[in-house]
Amino acid sequence: MTAFTFAHDCPADAPDPSTGSADRARFDFTKPAVLLMAYGSVESLDQVEAYYTHIRHGSPPPTELLEELLARYRAIGGSSPLPGHTERQRAGVEAELSRRGLGVPVYAAMKHIDPFIGDVVARMAEEGITHIVAMALAPHFSTMSICSYCQAVDEARRGPGRPTYEMVRSWHDEPRLIDALATATREALGRLPAEVPAHVVFTAHSLPTRILERGDPYPDLLLTTGRSVAERLGMDEGRWSFAFQSAGRTQEPWLGPDLGEHLGSLASGGTLHVVVCPVGFVSDHLEVLYDVDIEARGRAAELGITLERARAMNDDATFIAGVVDVLERSLSPLAITP
């Protein structure tokens, strides 16, 4: 895995849990644990307003935006599978750690809905956890994303007797993550006619372009992942590209190209078949099931393009093993016994 160094605002007690930093010698490893964190999503429509309000830092959404979000959830069946996938990921990581002789408890928490990160960290402290290895279920570091998870952990663990913690930052080029993404992409390519080469578009959630002013590595990390998957598949440079999706509803500019616009460019160039691989997401949820499966697929149909989507990682065994590979580098020096 590529060494990753970048000045950022995360207040974790060590800069990177995979480095074996000397700072770690002062941590209390009597009872360590892993904390997996996800953005969160709703399991029923009656949760949408509170969830959206939390995302907006306590400001209730305007009626038109709330109705738009409700309509999107209705279009995918009225709920998101993200909570269930996150729990299965938690259980899979805990089981794989145990199988490797690292029998530590694994907790899961959400940023914008129950179980909130703060509540879970407080429960970990009550249960005697002395040190936390925290990992957001998002492989690509950005100051607007990963740092916010880190800060949520930090706010919750303040006070006497609270656990110390380390934050896994970017794991964008973890070998088994690349393996799992390549397998999913290959499967999607196999569903398209072999006689006409398909184009692969890797995607991730867009962020405001202002992140680039401080040298945020997010776009570069995403391109590294896309290039690594393409190389694993033996694809030439001209057969794959990168686009952003799910930009926020604000007036400021967001990273592009937008997926819908990019599909238009591909169609203009004669592309007939596209595979979308959302490398920035590790679970099926609204941004995949609506933004890709409904919105982007509809746009592709208008353009005469056949679009297939690579399956999400969810609890894929290779993906889970890759997550544990990352965590094991943080936990193995602790000499934990099952």
Image (cartoon, grey):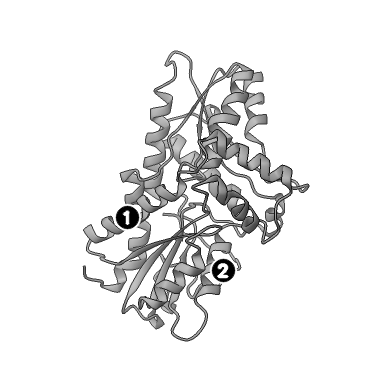
Q: Is residue 99 among what the camera can see?
A: yes
Disc 2 target residue: 151
88, 178: nearer the viewer: 88
Q: Which residue is drawn at 47% across and 50% down?
A: 172
- Residue type, label 2: Gln
**Rendered location of residue 216, percent (x, y):** 63, 56
Disc 1 target residue: 91
Quadrant of residue 249 in the image? top right
**Rendered location of residue 107, percent (x, y):** 38, 63
Depicted 226 relative to depicted 55: above or below: above
**Rendered location of residue 234, percent (x, y):** 42, 31
26, 135: nearer the viewer: 135
> Which labelled disc corresponds to residue 78?
none
Q: Rate crowding at label 1 as few (under 14), some (14 to 19) or many (20 or more) other CA atoms within 10 Å.
A: some
Q: Is residue 166 among what the camera can see?
A: no
Task: Specify the farthest residue to the top.
Answer: 195
- Residue type, label 1: Ala
72, 200: nearer the viewer: 72
Secondary structure under the numbered disc 2 in the rendered image = helix
Depicted 266 relative to depicted 212: above or below: above
Depicted 49 relative to depicted 241: above or below: below
Q: Which residue is drawn at 70% across and 50% down?
A: 209
- Between the C-alphas of marks 2 and 1, the distance is 25 Å
